[in-house]
Amino acid sequence: TTGFKVHYHYTLTGDGELTLECAVSSRGFMTKWIPKLGLQLELAADFQHVEWLGRGPFETYPDRKTGARIGAYRTTVNEAYVPYLIPQDYGNRTDTYWCRMTDDSGKGFSVSSDETFNFSAQKFSTSMLDRAHYTFQLKEENRVILNLDHRVSGVGGTANSVLNPYRVLPGEFQFVFILKPVI
C-alpha cells in the first residue's frame, strides 16, 4: 500500500502549552514529489486575526520569496485570500518563526517550532479548493483552516514545473509544533 506512517507525541503542560512532536515516513510506491507535509487544524470561525514573524506581508513559497522581507505582520483570514482564476491552495507564508491566531477580543493561541515553518489560514477547506473549477463554486466554511507545514513545495512558473531544489520528496521527517494559549 502507499501512504504515510505517522507518529504523534503530545505533551500538555499545566499552563496550557501543547507540544506536538511528529514523525512521518513514506510507505509504498510514492509520487516523485509531494505538495506539502505538515498538519491541518480546523478552528472556530472566530479566529479571524493572524499575526506572524516571517516573510511577508503577501503570500510566499520556497521558490517565490526573495521580494518578501522577514518582519512582523498581521492580516485577517479574509484579507489573506488570494482569488486565483482556478481555485487552489493559497496564502502560504514561508520562513515563519511564530504565528498567532486570535479572535476579536485578542484571545487565541500562538504556534512556534524548533525551526522555521510554513503556514496559511484559509476560509475554504482543502477538499473544496480541490473540487472547485471556478471561484463562484467556493462556499466559505463556518471555520478557519490552519495549515502548519514543515515543508512546502514551490509553485514553479507558467511554462516550468517546480524545480528540483524546491520539491518536497517522499522520505522520513521529524518536526515539532508548540501551541500556547494567548489570553
Image (cartoon, rainbow, N blue to C red):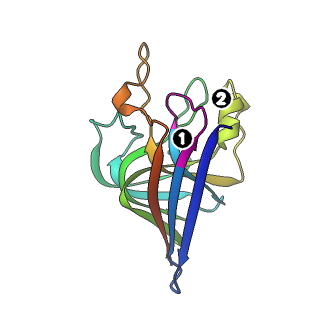
User: In percent of the image, x 50 and y 85: which residue is there?
Assistant: 15
User: In percent of the image, x 52 and y 34: which residue is there?
Assistant: 34
Residue 173 vs 159, above or below: the answer is below
> Is residue 105 something one can see in this rendering?
no
- What SS does tag 2 mark? helix
> Is residue 162 something one can see in this rendering?
yes
Q: Position of residue 96 (x, y in %)?
A: 37, 53
Left or right of 108, for residue 93? left
Residue pushed farthest bottom? Answer: 14
- The region drawn magenta spans 25-35
Location of mark 2 (residue): 135
Location of mark 1 (residue): 81
- The amino acid type, in three-letter code, at marker 1 is Tyr
Q: How many marks?
A: 2
Query: What secondary structure do most residues of the magenta stretch adopt?
Result: loop
Residue 26 counted in the magenta span:
yes
The Cα–Cα distance between marks 2 and 1, rounded to whole angstroms, is 12 Å
- What SS does tag 1 mark? loop
Quarter holding residue 84: top right
- The amino acid type, in three-letter code, at marker 2 is Thr
